[in-house]
Amino acid sequence: MRLDRTLSLNLVRPLMRMGIPSSRRALPILMYHAISDDTEPGVSAYYRTNTSPARFEQHLRCLNDRGFRSASLNEAARMLHQGLAKEGKIIAITFDDGFRDFYDAAYPLLKKYGHVATVYLPTGFIGEQRRSFKNKECLTWQEVRESHAQGIQFGSHTANHPVLYELSWKKIEDELAASKMQIEQVLGEKITGFAYPYAFPQQDRHFTEKFVQLLRRQGYQNSVTTMIGRASPDDDLFRLKRLPVNSDDDVELFAAKLDGAYDWLAHPQGWFKSVRHYRGAAGRREFDLPAAPLTAPGNSPL
């Protein structure tokens, strides 16, 4: 049993329907990684990062059925800052890691359903010849150029996808600068968006404040994180929350996430990060939420 699903669908969503307030002006930013049929054996549903092409198509169809219009992250951030009320139902679709299956599987479906997306590239794994990252093939620069010409936005995901929290500030600066510069050279335009790799350490305010200052000095204008939830108009554009999505998100759970019934998970996520921080342990999970405390006895973890 997935406790996150059970609580979202059977407790939070009914409370919302009864009038418990939820920010209707919030912006859902979807966080995808790979679009493939890999079932990720041995990985609990909460931590999976693959979304099958069939499930991804269901998600896009659901967005259209519910009247959502997609925007690049830069455009969505501008709308968020200026106010979403007049923009209608806006969604931002993002992809981390720059895998080849974005071009082969996700990109054709995005075109079919009339949506755009933002892809964050770890540039050390993107080349004119095919390279691999996490045992998956990555995009080539030619595929990046072609997708960009058709409206796909690209941003930085560092050069080598390290755990930034463990690096010196000089190495962090090098990662931010090198990836941004390379994408700009390939696409011939300024790159202003960044996606933080691995778990965003919001529990360490000193680190995050200094990191945001560094992003600003490098010329970035926004940054998405692995913090769970929808983005609100008063959120810092350099600490944007996202909704993790994978093959286990059927249409019912996916729709609940769009409506805000998954936002509650930000609180236990933040609490667990704080506990781990004070214990001196830096989490490396993509979403950094220990499964055990949210698992019913005798059942699989999230």
Image (cartoon, helix red, strand yellow):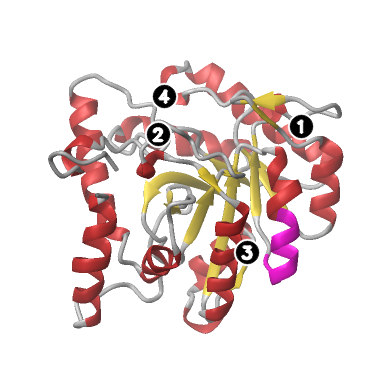
Q: Residue at (21%, 60%) from the top-left corner?
A: 7
State how far apart marks 4 and 2 are (Cα).
Answer: 24 Å
Callout 1: helix, strand or loop? helix
At label 1, which amino acid type do we have?
Answer: Gln
State how far apart marks 2 and 1 are (Cα).
Answer: 34 Å
Please say if the residues under marks 3 and 4 sit with CB atoms less than 8 Å apart: no
Disc 1 packing (10 Å; few <14; some 14–19; many ≥20): some
At label 2, which amino acid type do we have?
Answer: Val
Residue 54 versus residue 25 in the image, above or below: above
**Of the numbered discs in the image, which one, if any, rests on residue 43?**
2
What secondary structure do most residues of the magenta stretch adopt? helix
Q: Earlier in the sequence, mark 1 or mark 4?
A: 4
Q: Residue at (40%, 34%) from the top-left corner?
A: 43
Segment tinted magenta in the rendering: 107-115
State how far apart marks 3 and 1 are (Cα).
Answer: 22 Å
Q: Quick check: is 114 in the magenta stretch? A: yes
Please say if the residues under marks 3 and 1 sit with CB atoms less than 8 Å apart: no
Give the labeled residue for mark 4.
165
Disc 3 packing (10 Å; few <14; some 14–19; many ≥20): few
**Of the numbered discs in the image, which one, if any, rests on residue 182?**
1
Disc 2 packing (10 Å; few <14; some 14–19; many ≥20): few
At label 3, which amino acid type do we have?
Answer: Glu
Q: Earlier in the sequence, mark 2 or mark 1?
A: 2
Asked which quadrant contains residue 203, the reply is top left
**Of the numbered discs in the image, which one, if any, rests on residue 75?**
3
Residue 68 versus residue 7 in the image, above or below: below
Callout 2: helix, strand or loop? loop
